[in-house]
Amino acid sequence: AMKHTYGMFMDLGASLVQRWTIRVEQMGSQIMEVDLYEEMLPVAVEAIARSGFGMSKEHLQKNGEELIMAFKAIFMNMDGGSTAMQRARFILPYIIPPWLIGWLPLTPMVRRKRAIEILRGKVEWVILERIKQGPVENNMRDLLDSLLSLTQLDSENSHMRKDELLSHCMTFLSAGSSTTISLMSTVLSQLALHPRCAEKLRKELLEAFPSGLESSEDVEKVDQLSYLDAVYRECIRMYPPVPVSPRVANKDTSVGNYRFPKGSYIVLPIAAIQVKKSLWGPDADLFRPDRWLK
């Protein structure tokens, strides 16, 4: 289903490598410092915008900067600043209802709210443009087509209302970008910190693709690379893009020996579970892709 997007992903990867190659050549023998979040953000945003919502490369060249700035405001404004603000990011959801946090007159909250309005406007424009184009018979071009197929805007029998469609698109756009940024930044940083792993992976890639990825058929073969898969699995084990998963019990329930009354707020500590030594062994806190090759 995603085969038609392979060329786009290859283009994005090649552009990133080319940009870094030029920077390395310009730096000469000097050490080059790379802010992976800054580097991955435009790549991830363009990837999900083009593959999921059909935004053209030309449209993103004209409007992409505003989109990227909105993402920065949404995902980065709570990461910087004082220690107190960083702590508040984690504490507030446990003492204040989530719907109320967005209305607090804190500068990061105000910036985030404005950024969300910009992002919502962009997504709504894309939806309206796609509706004007109409469906393509027997062909789902992307995620947006799939969502629109569940939405009959003028029908009470629709599986999804227009406002729900917009909310789902916002979720996919933001979640798809943020998780991609997190994962790619983690993979590259871990390979930089573990040169032996990087060399082993480089060897596997060069043996499989001596001239690099040249076609969609090459992309399909990527899944067959065992060490690449091991590196990927080890990265998301140690540094999951979604480190916690909150839930609210909608009825009295039990999990094992634990009882949760209706309304209980439960947090699943994914990041903690995935480095738990009783589950992963004494080396659970070490980056060791080979554990996945057994």
Image (tube, rainbow, N blue to C red):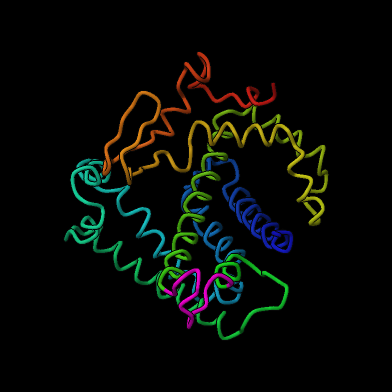
Q: Residue at x 63, y 22 (%)?
A: 291
State the residue lying farthest toward the top. 282
Rendered view: 285 above or below 92: above
Residue 283 or 279: which is nearer the viewer?
A: 279
In this image, 19 relative to 259: left or right? right
Q: Please name the predominant secondary structure of the magenta segment in the image.
A: loop
Q: Quadrant of the C terminus?
A: top right
In this image, 43 relative to 271: left or right? right
Q: Residue at x 73, y 64 (%)?
A: 4
Q: Quadrant of residue 30?
A: top right
Rendered view: 54 above or below 195: below
In this image, 137 relative to 153: left or right? right
Q: Magenta stretch: give its range.
A: 149-162
How far across and down, in percent of the image, does residue 47 sit? Answer: 59, 60
Within the magenta stretch, is there residue 157? yes
How far across and down, in percent of the image, does residue 159 sit? Answer: 50, 69
How far across and down, in percent of the image, does residue 97 sit? Answer: 21, 51
Q: Residue at x 47, y 47 (%)?
A: 35
Residue 17 or 228: which is nearer the viewer?
A: 228
Q: Quadrant of residue 215?
A: bottom right
Within the magenta stretch, is there residue 174? no
How far across and down, in percent of the image, does residue 139 sit? Answer: 71, 72
